[in-house]
Amino acid sequence: MVGQAAVSKRKSYSYVYGLRCSKSYDGVRVLDVVPGSVAHLMGMRKGWFIVAINDKPARLGKLKQAISQLLRDQDVQLRLTLKNRKGRLKRIVLPLSEPFSTRYAREKQEKIWDLAGFMIGFCVDGNYSVLFVARVRPGSRAEKSGLRLFDRILAINDVVPYTPERFFQLIFEAEIIGIRIKNNFGDMYVLRAERTMLLPDEEQMFLNDAAMEGENIVSEVLSRLNGDYYELRGIILPLSRNQGTEIDHVLVGPEGVFVVETKRLAGCVVGKDEEKYWVQYVGRTRKEIFNPVWQNRYHERAVKGVLGSYGIEVPVLPVVVVVGGTVRVNSDMPVIADKDLLDFVRKHPRMVNEQECRRIAKILESERLSSFYGW
């Protein structure tokens, strides 16, 4: 708790986000700051007085609330008015970090923000320096990958990036990125991703646009269903204790819960259920794609896991919908064209009433995660 409490007529102060403070006649006095803590990375320093928070008079409770909101919403900026011991006022916008000294770092920072949706900060205080996540755009690749505000960046592929320039160099040169993180709770883990998934190249951007177009087409088809149907699009559900999986479409209806994996393809795709990769032929070009049936098995498992935890027993019906090209596969899971999707849904018997459909949709929505790492 931020603030002070009486203990045997003596005052004791507790740390919150690495900040120890007390009431002051004109706001909040910073008594101490833990190196490497959220407060330290925000730019807080010992001996400061916080006069105003977001242009309103500073109070201990308001300070805790403002920092909590900053951590929760990721992209919210916090304005503080500070006063030093000489009475000089300084206004800052948090999170605060050291400015990048080179044009290279500034350009790479802008590119990472545009493509992945996060910024890094560089905190220098005497002999202490650390790289950290300074900003995360809601809904971005960075947020879905699990990056959070004030995560400390310890290493990239086991190499310690002592400077922002080294960080950017390691990120852009790697094919597989492994970012060793220490979060605000002191937990350490490695976030792994293909570089093109976090920082997509032109080919990946083209594939992303095609995937979005395919999902839009499937959503338009599903919107033609009359009655008590609920579509949850792009929902991340827990797959294990600390990992989630993103599902293109979950359709809740009287027939059950449909788990839809959408593929926007060109040419002809050939494959088998047991094969990890299928082959896509476009003219004379041959390309391997990850088996979407395997992919949808994870999605099916995630949906069943959530429903099972609530004791709900309804049919869970996985299906792969192909938009565009033709598919010749041998699979136990239905692989159909988008034009056949409505008939596929309607051919199943109705087993779920209106009230239960609404309840299932609300439960799935309540279990939605904001990242693949479950936080």
Image: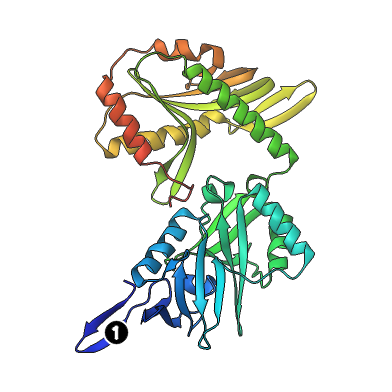
Quick one: quadrant of the N terminus? bottom left
Residue 274 shows up from this direction: no
- Where is 311 relative to 55, above or below? above
What's the residue at 51%, 72% (across, down)? Answer: 81
What's the residue at 73%, 43% (across, down)? Answer: 201
Task: Name the residue nearer the viewer: 326 or 78.
Answer: 78
Q: Position of residue 162 (x, y in %)?
A: 66, 73
Crowding at dot 1, Cα within 10 Å, few <14 / some 14-19 / many 20+, comes out as few
- Where is 299 relative to 282, above or below? below
Q: Quadrant of residue 32?
A: bottom left
Q: Quadrant of residue 287?
A: top right
Q: Position of residue 23 (x, y in %)?
A: 35, 79
- 32 left or right, relative to 314: right
The number of callouts visible is 1
Task: Name the residue nearer the viewer: 192 or 5.
Answer: 5
What's the residue at 37%, 76% (across, down)? Answer: 15
Q: Position of residue 74 (x, y in %)?
A: 50, 55
**What residue is shown with label 1?**
12
- 296 left or right, relative to 363: right
> Which secondary structure lies at badge 1?
strand
**Scheme of image coloration:** rainbow
Q: Amino acid at mark 1?
A: Ser
Q: Position of residue 313 (x, y in %)?
A: 27, 28
Residue 277 shows up from this direction: yes
What's the residue at 46%, 54% (across, down)? Answer: 73
- Where is 276 relative to 32, above or below? above
